[in-house]
Amino acid sequence: MSNHPMAPIYAGTPHRFPMLLVDCVEELAPGYGRVLKLVSVNEALFERFGDAPPTLPFPLLVDALGQVAIMLLRGKDDASVWYLGGIEAMTFHAPVPAGSALRMEARVLKKWRTTARIEVKAWNGPVPAASGFMVLSQRGSARDD
């Protein structure tokens, strides 16, 4: 499966359909990652009320950014689990409508033994969609067993 286009995503996060919110890895290097999420109008997550245009709910945008952060923190063949410990200064700049190509990135700012602080950002084309910081905590590694 290592040549499969989804291999970097499946290796980097435990998420699977329907909660996998990453479609394509553009860059994944130590301490930095950039991914793409194609926001389709056909997604089940678009529970609309009235005639409002479908947009990606902000809580799911936060979850998607967290998945990018997890991909940075999990090593190859790493079965550890990273939990969200906190969100700092998360700002939502603009809604992400259906039909968007959402580009998300994460950068490790500091990593302690089992804790990391990650800067996360998202754009819809040139328009910023969200930015902030996440603190994640690791469980399940050989270090803390």
Image: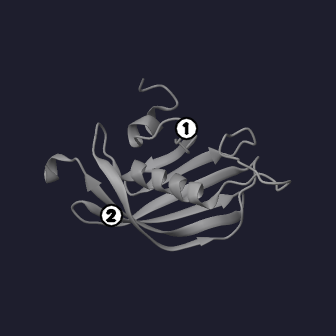
Q: Quadrant of residue 86?
A: bottom left
Q: Position of residue 123 (x, y in %)?
A: 65, 60
Which three-letter amino acid code belongs to the residue tagged 2? Ala
Whether residue 62 sits left or right of residue 82 in the image: it is: right
Q: Residue at x 65, y 57 (%)?
A: 57
Is residue 32 or residue 15 the one in the foreground?
15
Residue that appears at 33% across and 64% down: 116
The residue drawn where x is 28% and y is 40% is: 79
- Between 65 and 34, the one nearer to me in the picture: 65
Please state which of residues 18 and 29 is positioned toward the viewer in this rendering.
Answer: 18
Q: Secondary structure at mark 2?
A: strand
Which residue lies under the disc numbered 2?
A: 116
In the figure, 81 relative to 1: above or below?
Answer: below
Instruction: Give amino acid for label 1.
Output: Pro
Task: Give the vertical position of 135 relative to 138 (above or below).
Answer: below
Counting residues from the start of the chain, the first of labels 2 and 1 encountered is 1
Q: Residue at x 68, y 40 (%)?
A: 43
Query: Callout 1: few (<14), some (14-19), or many (20+) C-alpha neighbours within 10 Å?
Result: few
Q: Which mark is residue 27?
A: none
Quadrant, the N terminus: top left
Residue 18, label in figure? 1
Instruction: For marks 2 and 1, give the one nearer the viewer.
Output: 1
Helix or strand or loop: what does disc 1 sit on?
loop
**Quarter of the image holding residue 13?**
top left
Q: Quadrant of residue 80?
A: top left
Residue 89 percent location from the top left of the image: 51, 76
